[in-house]
Every structure is written in C-alpha cells, then in structure tokens.
Image (cartoon, rainbow, N blue to C red):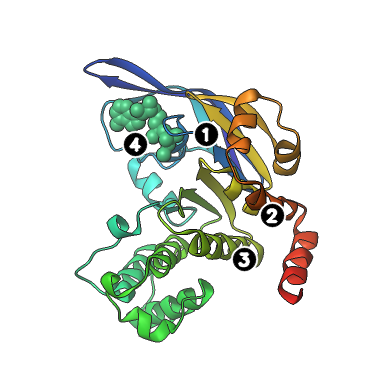
Amino acid sequence: MLEIKNLSVDFHTDGGIVHAVQNVNLSMGEGEIRGLVGESGSGKSVTSMTILQLLGTRRARISSGEILFEGKNLLELSSKEMGTVRGREIGLVSQNALSALDPSFTVGAQLVEVIRRHQNVSKQEAKDQALDTFRLVAMPDPEQKLRAYQHQLSGGQRQRVVIAMALAGRPRLLLADEPTTALDATVQKQILDLLLEINQKLGTGILMVTHDFGVVSHLCQTVTVMRKGRIVEDGPAHAMLTAPEHPYTQSLINSVPKLDLEDSMRSVPRAERRLHVFEEISA
Ligand code: ADP
Ligand code: MG
C-alpha cells in the first residue's frame, strides 16, 4: 500500500542545513499497523508529514526518494491531486486535538464540513454520516456530543473527534502522530484500543508515530526505529520487543515500565489478537 524509498529531507535554516531524514525506507501492507519509533528529534514527524506534503515550510527540501502509495509517487502529484489524497486516501490524526479543532463551531458542524469536503452529499446525509462516525469512534451520547463545543468535551472525547474527522473520508491509511501523548494513561489506552478496533472493523492501515514502545506493544504489528534521521532497526513488533538488536532500540524498550510491555502479546496476527482481547474482558 505504502512504500517510502530512500527518502531524504533537509531544512535549509539560517544556521545551515539540517538533515532531518536520511535515506529512509519504509513499507506498509494493506491494513498493517506499523510503529515509527524514536526519541524526540529523530525525524518521525518529518517523515510522516512528507507523506502528505504537509511540511509547512519553504525551507524544507526533499533531496532524494519516492513515496509510492498504491503505485503512484505522491511526490510527483500536483497540489490539487495531493488535496484529494489527503483525507480521502490518507487521514491524519494529530497529537494536539485543541489545535486541530475550532473553538467557535460545534464539533458536529466541523465533522459535517469535513464529510462534505470529501463527498458530494446533502447536508442531511452528511449529518447522518457524522452520527455514524461518532458511533464508530465510540463517542458517549453521540447525538448530544455532535452539538457540543470542544471546551465541553474531555481530552479523550476531543481525541475521538479528531479521529472521527480523520476517518470522515474513509481513508485506507491513517497517520497518527503521537495521538495519545497528551492524554493520561487510562485514556491513552482507550484511544489505542479504539484505533485497534477501527483497524479490525475497517481494515484501515495505521502508521503510529510514537516515542513510546509501550504504545508499540499495545498496537503495532511491525516497527521502524529511527535515530537522528536514519533507520536503525526494522521488523515485526513482537520479535523486536522480545529481542531488540540495536542498542538504541534496547534503550528505548528498557525505558518503558515492564508491566506496560506485557500487552505485547497483542502483536500477533489479527484473528488471534481478537481472541486475546476477548479473553481479557471475560477474565
Ligand atoms: P520527531 O518527530 O522524531 O520528534 P521531527 O521529525 O519533528 O522529530 O524533527 C526531525 C529533525 O528535523 C529535528 O532535528 C528538527 O529540529 C528538525 N526540524 C523539524 N522541522 C523543522 C523546521 N521547520 N525547520 C528546521 N528544522 C526542522
Ligand atoms: Mg514529532
């Protein structure tokens, strides 16, 4: 589905050239959940924002590489073509729900607007879809919440709105950049479970950008580890969590409390994983 080949991205700053991403290769199959992991500044966000061409600065230069999505090189698309990829084929879940939402409109109005941007549907049809999408993201009291403003929602509910907006165009791939970092541990787990459920129900692939191997153990099937703009290790999540090869990967894994890693059994094939989740609930 997604194949990043030999990607390098530089920033031309007043202080010189920053090589933010160097010769990165990363591939994802249909419906795969891949972790993109590394400490702050390692080039994770630049890599994921380059996929959507949302680097947001003229100082950024893609100095090499291709980003193939379903066979087409995204780096060669016009901005108009890229506009239809964003949201409709690849959705973005950002870390900070507050900056993604507009305080002056209800969250329902914002969701309806996104749905109508992606699909040529009537206002009523868009409203019906908004309600369906709120149900999909397990929003409590979904009808009432559509009429709420962001300040009336909890942090976890706001992140559910952001995920609903990312799903509005029914993309095949979600880029989730530290989507739970701002949340406390219990809510973080709920949001990760929601992303898993969406993956299972809709088959949406997820590129999960995180600094936290606890998140990886909860959710990811495969992992790419980055350090200082380069990939240091890549492979199945379970193997990496139990036997990391690179010392940097080892140190990232060692920094996560042991209990949090016990969820790593979830990184097994889908059918089995569903069973594990079920057993936990009934236990
Ligand atoms: P991560 O998401 O892994 O924390 P980033 O991808 O945001 O890291 O950043 C990678 C590197 O690129 C860092 O060294 C960062 O300082 C640099 N960088 C990111 N954005 C810019 C920018 N707009 N201008 C200059 N340097 C940037
Ligand atoms: Mg980042």
Q: Earlier in the sequence, mark 2 or mark 3?
A: 3
Residue 138 - label: none
> Along the polypeptide, which appears first: circle 1 or circle 3?
1
Question: How many neighbours does mark 3 have within 10 angstroms: few (below 14), some (14-19), or many (20 or more)?
Answer: some
Image quadrant holding the N terminus, namely: top right
Residue with the mark numbered 1? 38
Closer to the chain start, of discs 1 and 2, is 1
The label nearer to you, 4 versus 2, is: 2
Residue 174, visible in the rendered structure = yes
For discs 3 and 4, the disc positioned in front in the rendered view: 3
Q: Amino acid at mark 2?
A: Asp
**Residue that badge 4 annotates:** 55
Labelled pair 4, 1 in contact (Cβ < 8 Å): no
Which residue has dot 2 on it?
A: 263
The answer to whether the residue labelled 1 contacts the one labelled 3, judged by CB atoms less than 8 Å apart, is: no
What numbered label is drawn on residue 197? 3
Give, as a three-letter code, the residue at label 1: Gly
Residue 2, located in which quarter of the rendered image? Answer: top right
Quarter of the C terminus within the rendering: bottom right
Q: Is mark 4 within 8 Å of ligand 1?
A: yes
Disc 1 is placed on an element classified as loop
Looking at marks 4 and 1 on the same chain, the residue that comes earlier in the sequence is marked by 1
Q: Position of residue 205 (x, y in %)?
A: 60, 52
The kind of residue on which mark 4 rests is Leu
Quadrant assignment, res 35: top right
Left or right for 18, reference 184: left
CB-based contact (under 8 Å), mark 1 and mark 2: no
Marks 4 and 2, how far apart in space? 34 Å
**At x 27% / y 26%, what residue is drawn?**
59
